[in-house]
Amino acid sequence: MTADVIERMRGGLVVSCQAYPGEPMRHPETMAQVARAAELGGATAIRCQGLADISAIKGRVKIPVIGLWKEGDEGIYITPTLRHARACAMAGADVVAIDATGRPRRDGLTYAQTVERLHDEGILVMADCSSFEDARAAVEAGSDIVSTTLAGYTPDRPKTDGPDLELLAEIVAAFPDVPVLCEGRVHTPEQAAAVMEAGAFAVVVGTGITHPTSITHWFARAIGLDVEAPTH
Protein backbone atom coordinates (compact mmCIF):
# COMPACT_ATOMS: atom_id res chain seq x y z
CA MET A 1 0.00 0.00 0.00
CA THR A 2 2.76 2.46 0.91
CA ALA A 3 4.65 1.82 -2.32
CA ASP A 4 1.43 2.34 -4.27
CA VAL A 5 1.03 5.84 -2.80
CA ILE A 6 4.33 6.94 -4.31
CA GLU A 7 3.85 5.06 -7.58
CA ARG A 8 0.60 6.92 -8.16
CA MET A 9 2.62 10.14 -8.36
CA ARG A 10 4.98 8.90 -11.08
CA GLY A 11 5.01 11.22 -14.08
CA GLY A 12 2.33 13.35 -12.50
CA LEU A 13 1.41 16.75 -11.17
CA VAL A 14 1.41 17.40 -7.43
CA VAL A 15 -0.57 20.54 -6.60
CA SER A 16 0.37 22.45 -3.47
CA CYS A 17 -2.72 23.92 -1.83
CA GLN A 18 -1.56 26.39 0.79
CA ALA A 19 -2.66 29.86 1.88
CA TYR A 20 -0.48 32.17 3.91
CA PRO A 21 -1.50 33.53 7.34
CA GLY A 22 -3.88 36.47 7.10
CA GLU A 23 -5.02 35.69 3.56
CA PRO A 24 -8.71 35.38 2.62
CA MET A 25 -8.30 31.75 1.51
CA ARG A 26 -6.72 30.66 4.80
CA HIS A 27 -9.44 28.20 5.80
CA PRO A 28 -9.46 24.37 5.77
CA GLU A 29 -12.73 24.11 3.85
CA THR A 30 -11.50 26.54 1.22
CA MET A 31 -8.27 24.60 0.78
CA ALA A 32 -10.24 21.36 0.54
CA GLN A 33 -12.33 22.86 -2.26
CA VAL A 34 -9.19 24.05 -4.05
CA ALA A 35 -7.68 20.58 -3.67
CA ARG A 36 -10.77 18.90 -5.08
CA ALA A 37 -10.74 21.33 -8.03
CA ALA A 38 -7.09 20.45 -8.65
CA GLU A 39 -7.94 16.76 -8.55
CA LEU A 40 -10.66 17.29 -11.15
CA GLY A 41 -8.11 19.13 -13.28
CA GLY A 42 -5.73 16.17 -13.30
CA ALA A 43 -3.57 16.48 -10.19
CA THR A 44 -2.10 13.15 -9.10
CA ALA A 45 -1.42 14.25 -5.50
CA ILE A 46 -1.95 17.20 -3.18
CA ARG A 47 0.60 18.88 -0.92
CA CYS A 48 -0.88 20.85 1.98
CA GLN A 49 0.00 22.50 5.29
CA GLY A 50 -1.51 22.30 8.74
CA LEU A 51 -3.43 19.61 10.56
CA ALA A 52 -6.87 21.05 9.85
CA ASP A 53 -6.11 21.42 6.14
CA ILE A 54 -4.66 17.91 5.91
CA SER A 55 -7.75 16.44 7.53
CA ALA A 56 -10.19 18.43 5.43
CA ILE A 57 -8.40 17.70 2.17
CA LYS A 58 -7.97 13.99 2.94
CA GLY A 59 -11.72 13.76 3.36
CA ARG A 60 -12.36 15.45 0.02
CA VAL A 61 -9.93 13.88 -2.48
CA LYS A 62 -9.05 10.35 -3.55
CA ILE A 63 -5.47 11.07 -4.59
CA PRO A 64 -2.47 10.90 -2.20
CA VAL A 65 -1.99 13.73 0.26
CA ILE A 66 1.48 15.02 1.20
CA GLY A 67 1.16 16.80 4.52
CA LEU A 68 3.40 19.15 6.43
CA TRP A 69 3.15 21.45 9.42
CA LYS A 70 4.77 24.88 9.26
CA GLU A 71 5.63 26.49 12.58
CA GLY A 72 7.61 29.71 12.81
CA ASP A 73 9.45 31.39 9.95
CA GLU A 74 13.14 30.95 10.75
CA GLY A 75 15.47 27.98 10.53
CA ILE A 76 13.63 24.68 10.21
CA TYR A 77 9.92 25.43 10.17
CA ILE A 78 8.59 22.78 7.77
CA THR A 79 7.58 19.92 10.07
CA PRO A 80 10.35 20.86 12.53
CA THR A 81 10.10 17.94 14.96
CA LEU A 82 9.16 14.28 15.16
CA ARG A 83 6.01 15.31 17.03
CA HIS A 84 4.93 17.53 14.14
CA ALA A 85 5.52 14.72 11.65
CA ARG A 86 3.54 12.20 13.66
CA ALA A 87 0.67 14.67 13.97
CA CYS A 88 0.57 15.14 10.18
CA ALA A 89 0.30 11.38 9.71
CA MET A 90 -2.43 11.16 12.33
CA ALA A 91 -4.33 13.93 10.54
CA GLY A 92 -4.39 11.79 7.40
CA ALA A 93 -1.26 12.55 5.39
CA ASP A 94 -0.17 9.65 3.19
CA VAL A 95 3.33 11.14 3.05
CA VAL A 96 4.87 13.61 5.51
CA ALA A 97 7.13 16.35 4.11
CA ILE A 98 10.05 17.37 6.33
CA ASP A 99 12.83 19.94 6.08
CA ALA A 100 15.86 17.79 5.23
CA THR A 101 18.55 20.47 5.53
CA GLY A 102 21.44 20.02 7.92
CA ARG A 103 20.27 22.81 10.22
CA PRO A 104 19.56 21.98 13.88
CA ARG A 105 16.15 20.48 14.56
CA ARG A 106 14.14 21.75 17.51
CA ASP A 107 13.83 18.39 19.24
CA GLY A 108 17.54 17.60 19.00
CA LEU A 109 17.07 14.67 16.63
CA THR A 110 18.94 14.47 13.36
CA TYR A 111 17.03 14.18 10.12
CA ALA A 112 18.14 10.55 9.81
CA GLN A 113 16.91 9.74 13.31
CA THR A 114 13.57 11.34 12.52
CA VAL A 115 13.17 9.30 9.35
CA GLU A 116 14.10 6.10 11.14
CA ARG A 117 11.49 6.62 13.83
CA LEU A 118 8.80 7.53 11.32
CA HIS A 119 9.58 4.47 9.22
CA ASP A 120 9.28 2.32 12.35
CA GLU A 121 5.70 3.59 12.50
CA GLY A 122 5.04 2.97 8.80
CA ILE A 123 5.09 6.66 7.83
CA LEU A 124 6.41 7.71 4.41
CA VAL A 125 8.77 10.68 4.30
CA MET A 126 9.36 13.36 1.67
CA ALA A 127 12.68 15.19 2.09
CA ASP A 128 12.50 18.92 1.37
CA CYS A 129 16.06 19.69 0.26
CA SER A 130 17.98 22.88 -0.50
CA SER A 131 21.12 21.41 -2.10
CA PHE A 132 22.71 18.29 -3.52
CA GLU A 133 24.33 17.63 -0.15
CA ASP A 134 20.90 17.67 1.48
CA ALA A 135 19.60 15.25 -1.13
CA ARG A 136 22.50 12.87 -0.65
CA ALA A 137 22.01 12.86 3.12
CA ALA A 138 18.27 12.36 2.63
CA VAL A 139 18.85 9.36 0.39
CA GLU A 140 21.32 7.89 2.86
CA ALA A 141 18.69 8.35 5.60
CA GLY A 142 16.25 6.27 3.57
CA SER A 143 13.84 9.03 2.53
CA ASP A 144 10.99 7.75 0.37
CA ILE A 145 10.88 10.89 -1.79
CA VAL A 146 13.48 13.62 -2.35
CA SER A 147 12.46 17.10 -3.47
CA THR A 148 14.12 20.39 -4.45
CA THR A 149 11.59 22.32 -2.36
CA LEU A 150 14.06 24.54 -0.49
CA ALA A 151 16.53 25.25 -3.30
CA GLY A 152 17.11 28.99 -3.31
CA TYR A 153 15.59 29.50 0.12
CA THR A 154 18.76 28.85 2.14
CA PRO A 155 22.31 30.15 1.64
CA ASP A 156 23.31 26.84 0.00
CA ARG A 157 22.20 27.82 -3.50
CA PRO A 158 21.22 31.03 -5.30
CA LYS A 159 17.55 31.52 -6.05
CA THR A 160 16.95 30.73 -9.70
CA ASP A 161 14.42 32.42 -11.94
CA GLY A 162 12.13 29.44 -12.25
CA PRO A 163 12.79 25.89 -11.05
CA ASP A 164 16.35 24.84 -10.25
CA LEU A 165 16.76 22.48 -13.18
CA GLU A 166 20.50 22.17 -12.64
CA LEU A 167 20.04 20.83 -9.12
CA LEU A 168 17.21 18.56 -10.25
CA ALA A 169 19.34 17.02 -12.99
CA GLU A 170 22.25 16.51 -10.60
CA ILE A 171 20.09 14.69 -8.05
CA VAL A 172 18.33 12.55 -10.67
CA ALA A 173 21.65 11.50 -12.20
CA ALA A 174 23.15 10.57 -8.84
CA PHE A 175 20.13 8.68 -7.50
CA PRO A 176 18.25 7.15 -10.45
CA ASP A 177 16.28 4.75 -8.27
CA VAL A 178 14.91 7.41 -5.90
CA PRO A 179 11.69 9.33 -6.66
CA VAL A 180 12.88 12.92 -7.14
CA LEU A 181 10.29 15.68 -7.22
CA CYS A 182 10.94 19.20 -8.44
CA GLU A 183 9.28 21.91 -6.38
CA GLY A 184 9.83 25.63 -6.24
CA ARG A 185 9.04 28.43 -8.72
CA VAL A 186 7.32 26.24 -11.31
CA HIS A 187 4.93 28.90 -12.54
CA THR A 188 4.00 27.91 -16.09
CA PRO A 189 3.02 24.78 -18.01
CA GLU A 190 6.20 25.18 -20.04
CA GLN A 191 8.34 25.12 -16.90
CA ALA A 192 6.48 22.04 -15.66
CA ALA A 193 7.21 20.30 -18.97
CA ALA A 194 10.90 21.26 -18.70
CA VAL A 195 11.01 19.76 -15.22
CA MET A 196 9.68 16.45 -16.47
CA GLU A 197 12.07 16.48 -19.43
CA ALA A 198 14.91 16.93 -16.91
CA GLY A 199 13.98 13.61 -15.34
CA ALA A 200 11.74 14.45 -12.39
CA PHE A 201 9.57 11.68 -10.98
CA ALA A 202 6.81 14.29 -10.62
CA VAL A 203 6.46 18.07 -10.56
CA VAL A 204 5.01 20.14 -7.72
CA VAL A 205 3.17 23.35 -8.58
CA GLY A 206 1.75 25.65 -5.93
CA THR A 207 1.58 29.40 -6.48
CA GLY A 208 1.04 29.13 -10.24
CA ILE A 209 -2.19 27.19 -9.69
CA THR A 210 -3.51 27.86 -6.20
CA HIS A 211 -2.46 31.39 -5.16
CA PRO A 212 -4.76 33.89 -6.89
CA THR A 213 -3.16 36.92 -5.22
CA SER A 214 0.21 36.18 -6.83
CA ILE A 215 -1.32 35.22 -10.18
CA THR A 216 -3.36 38.44 -10.25
CA HIS A 217 -0.21 40.41 -9.46
CA TRP A 218 1.61 38.80 -12.40
CA PHE A 219 -1.15 39.90 -14.77
CA ALA A 220 -1.41 43.36 -13.24
CA ARG A 221 2.31 43.98 -13.67
CA ALA A 222 2.23 42.58 -17.20
CA ILE A 223 -0.27 45.26 -18.28
CA GLY A 224 1.72 48.03 -16.64
CA LEU A 225 -0.05 48.51 -13.33
CA ASP A 226 2.18 49.81 -10.54
CA VAL A 227 1.19 47.39 -7.80
CA GLU A 228 3.23 46.00 -4.96
CA ALA A 229 4.06 42.31 -4.86
CA PRO A 230 2.12 40.36 -2.24
CA THR A 231 4.01 39.65 0.95
CA HIS A 232 3.99 36.26 2.65
Image (cartoon, rainbow, N blue to C red):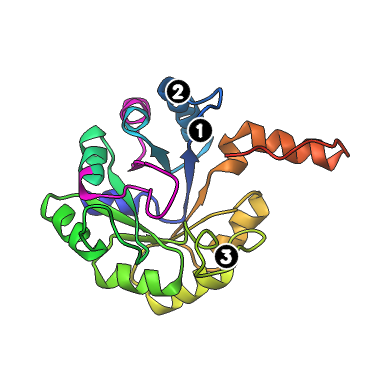
Query: Which of 101 and 63 lies nearest the eye of the viewer?
Result: 101
Magenta span of residues: 55-83
State the separation of the CA atoms marked 3 and 1. 23 Å
The secondary element bearing badge 1 is classed as: loop
Q: Which residue is mark 2?
A: 27
Query: What residue type is disc 3 on?
Result: Asp
Identify the residue at horizontal 16%, vertical 56% (top origin): 119
Identify the residue at horizontal 64%, vertical 56% (top origin): 191
124 lies left or right of 117 = right
Q: Which residue is mark 1?
A: 19
Query: Which of 17 and 159 lies nearest the eye of the viewer?
Result: 159
Magenta stretch holds residue 38: no
Is residue 122 placed above or below 179 in the rendered structure?
above
Query: What residue type is disc 1 on?
Result: Ala
Confirm or deny contact between disc 2 and disc 1 (CB under 8 A): yes
Mark drawn on residue 164: 3
Q: Position of residue 81 (x, y in %)?
A: 25, 49
Identify the residue at horizontal 48%, vertical 41% (top origin): 16
